[in-house]
Image (cartoon, rainbow, N blue to C red):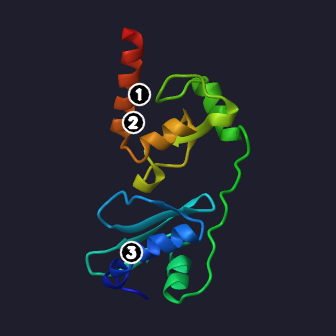
Amino acid sequence: MYQASQIAKKVTSFRAWLTSAGAEVLEPTNEWEMVRFRSGGETSIIYRNAAGGVKYTGAADAAYKAFAGNKPWRALPATQRKRSSPMIRAIRKRDGDLCFFCHEVVSEETESAEHLVSVTHGGPNHISNMFLAHKVCNAKAGHLSAPEKVKLSIKVALKRKIT
């Protein structure tokens, strides 16, 4: 097992290695994340803790071991989602076809289900915590908190009403 100090010394080269292996390197979202990346539609993270230890999620452990051991590793391609999943159909039935963020109609090609409280922040993966959003709007919102998402939605709604 690696210590946070060992990984910290190699973070830049590890990120470059991940990119060359086909992973999408993402910006950390808090002070405890050392590396965050997406592979196969899954986000993987290497966290450090106050004691200098490390915790891995998703493919992070396998990727770092391959990197440190100079072994081959390839990021999995993003999985294709089925169009209009039952969850999204249920959200559309409940809320209509407008994006929560920009209040424009969402087509099947651009649809995504956004969590009001992200799963990483303890939100449930349940329809009561989800709403319809364009993939682009969803990506722009990133990891905003629930109040920040609501403020963004209200700001856009008020702006649309004024103009």
Mark 3 vs mark 1: in front? 3
- Badge 1 crowding class, 10 Å Cα cut-off, few under 14, some 14 to 19, many 20 or more, is some
Q: Position of residue 123 (x, y in %)?
A: 45, 49
Q: Is residue 91 left or right of residue 121?
A: right
Task: Identify which residue, 71 or 121, lies in the foreground.
Answer: 71
Mark 2 and mark 3 lie on one chain; the one further toward the N terminus is 3
Type of amino acid at the residue the image marks with label 2:
Lys
Residue at point 62% right, 82% down?
A: 72
Q: Position of residue 8 (x, y in %)?
A: 33, 78
Are circles 2 and 1 on residues that touch, CB within 8 Å? Answer: yes
Taking the view exactly as shown, the residue that stands out farthest to the right is 82
Residue 116, can we see it? no
- Badge 3 crowding class, 10 Å Cα cut-off, few under 14, some 14 to 19, many 20 or more, is few
Which residue position holds label 3? 11
Mark 3 and mark 1 lie on one chain; the one further toward the N terminus is 3
Q: Position of residue 77 (x, y in %)?
A: 67, 61
Residue 161 is drawn in which quadrant? top left
Q: Is residue 34 left or right of residue 136?
A: left
Mark 2 vs mark 3: in front? 3
Query: What's the distance in space between the residues labelled 2 and 1, CA to CA?
Result: 6 Å
Which residue position holds label 1? 153
Query: What's the distance in space between the residues labelled 2 and 3, CA to CA?
Result: 31 Å
Q: Which mark is residue 149?
A: 2
Tag 3 secondary structure: helix
Query: What's the distance in space between the residues labelled 3 and 1, CA to CA?
Result: 36 Å
Tag 2 secondary structure: helix
Are circles 2 and 3 on residues that touch, CB within 8 Å? Answer: no
Q: Position of residue 13 (x, y in %)?
A: 43, 76
